[in-house]
Amino acid sequence: MSLRPIVHADAEAGGRAVAERVFDLAAEAIRARGAFAIAVSGGRSPETMFRAFASRRAAAAEGEPWTVLWCDERVVPPDDPRSNFGLARRLWLAPARVPAERILPVPTELPAEQAADRYDGLLRERFAPGASSPRPRQAFDVAVLGLGPDGHTASLFPGRPSLAVVGRWSVAERSPTQEPRVPRVTLTLEGIGHVRHAIFLAWGAEKRPVLSSLFSDDGTTGARDLPAGRVRAQESVEWHVDRSAWPTGPSA
């Protein structure tokens, strides 16, 4: 996380630009490996991106072999307005008619710990390298992450034990420090670390204080103790912010 964030005019422009970036990475992955896997988050930040995906019918056509999974999920029914899967389904997956076999939702019909265990096993089965693999295989191509005002990302909150978990790709978080305070399942830092490209979205003036903590005045990495500041990826970590969020103003 050493490069200055990419600053967009507003959240709408940023969401469309991130969608184009994801389309480019998807095309690259499909050319190189024949498939593309993306982990997405919830909240308001990805809404424009999801709509852009739907407009392009991303992952719906036979020639676009996308797999969709989740960086984190609230343990609520899929029709609950707090469901991250529900948001993606309404804005993208249903309008684009994405085939069910390409969607890997967290099994929220289970209690949080069981859901995390099941998801951990599912991700390893789908993406972990086999014993005969000559080199580690990245779990997925892109993770689109949000940023909370306290520096959390996915459902990895400051000071919580989940930040120190090793040997697992997903864990339960039963005591989130921000609303909605419902049990969750989240990728761990280790799980996110298998991704090729991590893409952060941060829109709105309420994100300015935490961005000031995460980045120094010249736009390079500042605080590393916040969960978002600890995210690493195999190839790149990108930050996309809007003018109201970036602490040094609209110059980028």
Image (cartoon, rainbow, N blue to C red):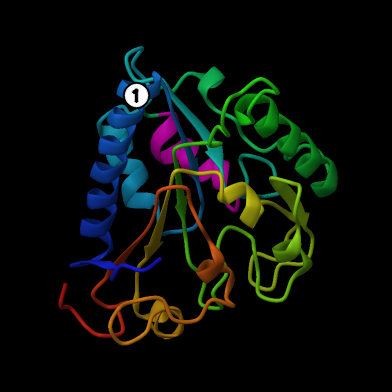
For the point 41% across and 80% down, which residue is it? Answer: 206
Image quadrant in which you'd find residue 130: top right
- Residue ranking furthest to the top: 62
Above or below residue 12? Residue 49 is: above
x, y percent for residue 215: 39, 80
Most common SS among magenta residues: helix
From the viewer's perspective, tell me whether residue 60 is left or right of residue 102.
left
Q: Residues within 10 Å of mark 1 (few under 14, many from 20)?
A: few
Q: Secondary structure at mark 1?
A: helix
- Circle 1: residue type: Ala
Image quadrant in which you'd find residue 106: top right
Q: Nearer the viewer, residue 60 or 180?
A: 60
From the viewer's perspective, tell me whether residue 91 is left or right of residue 179.
left
x, y percent for residue 201: 38, 61
x, y percent for residue 128: 64, 31
Q: Nearer the viewer, residue 191 or 68?
A: 191
x, y percent for residue 248: 25, 85
Residue behind mark 1 = 32
For the point 18% across and 67% down, which residue is it? Answer: 9
- Whether 124 is among the magenta residues is no
- Residue ranking furthest to the left: 251
Across the whole image, how many numbered discs are drawn on residues? 1
From the viewer's perspective, tell me whether residue 75 is left or right of residue 102.
right
Quadrant occupied by the N terminus: bottom left
Quadrant occupied by the C terminus: bottom left
Above or below residue 179? Residue 45 is: above
Magenta residue span: 81-94
Above or below residue 89? Residue 147 is: below
Q: Nearer the viewer, residue 168 or 184?
A: 168
From the viewer's perspective, tell me whether residue 6 is left or right of residue 207.
left
For the point 63% across and 25% down, which residue is it? Answer: 126
